[in-house]
Image: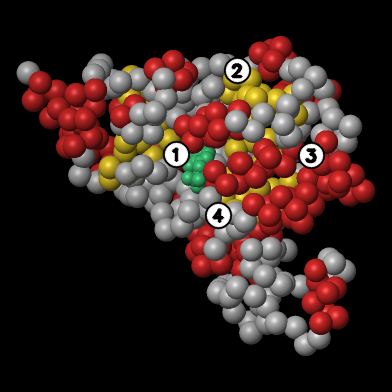
Amino acid sequence: MEFNTKLLHGKAIVSNPSREILPPVSQVTAFRYESMEELEKVFLHKSMGFAYSRIGNPTLSAFEQRVNELEGGVGAVSCSSGMSAIATALLGVCSAGDEIIAGSGLYGGTISLFHDLEKFGIHTVFVREMTPENIREAITDRTRVIFGELISNPTLKVLDVPTVAELAHEAKIPLFIDSTTATPYIARPLALGADVVIHSTSKYINGGGNSIGGIIVDGGKMAWDFGKHTALADFKKYGKRAFLLRLRTDLWENMGGCMAPANAFLNCIGLDTLGIRMERICSNADKLAKALAEIPGIEVNYLSLENHPYHGFVEKELGGYGGGILTFRAGSKEKAFAIIDKLNYALIASNIGDIRTLVIHPASTLYIHTSVEEREAAGVYDDTIRVSVGIEDPEDLIDDFVSAIREAAQDEE
Ligand SMILES: *Cc1c(COP(=O)(O)O)cnc(C)c1O
């Protein structure tokens, strides 16, 4: 089955009791049982069933199974947000005294989370360029996880997943990938060798800009060293599924960061059209990037452009797609603001992955609390504009941006 067919007819499309085409929204806190014996079995994980929606809910299960099937995992847990998913996944494998290796050009919220984790005795070693050589050098006997974004937002650097996974596994360390910007349509990190995939479903998976959410998918292939990964020691009997069980029956339910059933429902609707949305979004982004690159004085960062330093990965890891995000440098902060303010179709909003084109000046918003060094490591300069390309007609989008840039230049003269 190809991607779009699998979205609509895959194994994970469970038939619902009343033959609903979509998973019904189980908008309940708890589930009732005929006997105490039955409920006891559910609590002991001896029979399948739902007890309380923080721990499990049919709408969440439907969504989890669908993403799990697309990513090729052994199981997934859905979370209240992308940040909740990242925090839960990292705490799932780290204890006080442990180290994380991560790229310095990651999503701003994730960088902030790494700073927070220092207070719990979990130290992050930041690697400026996530090249296999640099990562290998950063590994110590305390390293418990390597964390990277497949396509970093907004730097647009691509992680060499097969090579990094291999060196991670030699050192008995798992590779966790935040694949939010790549989506399961563009890339399948588990098939490339990663151990765990995380998404902020708030972005492309939902697609309609209507729900905050996140998901963690376990590939189930990691040969855990339980002497090293003491956070998983109690789950040793589950072998390669230890991480999933640690989350499902322990950390995830105890942290309480579950997804709301209504959001899981909206995410299922979003997921149905992920393939065709991404097709259109990537095609639009490609056309817009090429049009902007022709304007003198405008420096464009987009993966599909021939001169992009990570261009080679588009074919190698991203199925030929450059993704839906591009950035460009306007010359100065004032000019960047002037261009943004003149746009008619692109909405000024702090989000990505919407069907509507969104723009933002990251330095004065998303990176306002980070140091200039951290900001520049993330490819964010004073004049950088980030565009999350939507599904509008490409002619209109190009016209909107080209006119705004031209008018901003005229105003300056
Ligand atoms: C948005 C985003 C997150 C955080 O997700 P939320 O759903 O906003 O909590 C994490 N990683 C990346 C790459 C993102 O774009």
Residues tagged 3 and 1 counted as in contact (Cβ below 8 A): no
Residue drawn at point x = 39 percent, y = 23 percent:
380
* Residue 179 in the figure: left or right of residue 380: right
Residue drawn at point x = 67 percent, y = 29 percent:
121
State yes or no: Cβ of the residue under disc 3 lies below 8 Å from any atom of ligand 1.
no
- Disc ID at residue 367: none
| Mark 3 or 2, nearer chain start | 2
Residue 291 x, y percent position in the rendering: 31, 29
**Number of marks drawn:** 4
Mark 3: give few (<14), some (14-19) or many (20+) Cα within 10 Å.
some
Residue drawn at point x = 78 percent, y = 28 percent:
173
Instruction: Give the residue number, with chain letter if any, for mark 1.
Output: 324
Q: Is mark 2 on a helix, strand or loop?
A: strand
| Mark 3 or 4, nearer chain start | 4
- Gap between marks 3 and 4 measured at Cα: 22 Å
| Mark 2 or 4, nearer chain start | 4
Q: What element carries label 4?
A: loop
Mark 4: give few (<14), some (14-19) or many (20+) Cα within 10 Å.
many
At label 2, which amino acid type do we have? Val
Residue 133 x, y percent position in the rendering: 69, 12
Image depth: mark 2 or mark 4 in front: 4
Instruction: Give the residue number, with chain letter if any, for mark 2.
Output: 127
- Gap between marks 1 and 2 measured at Cα: 25 Å
Vertical placement of 148 versus 33: above or below? above
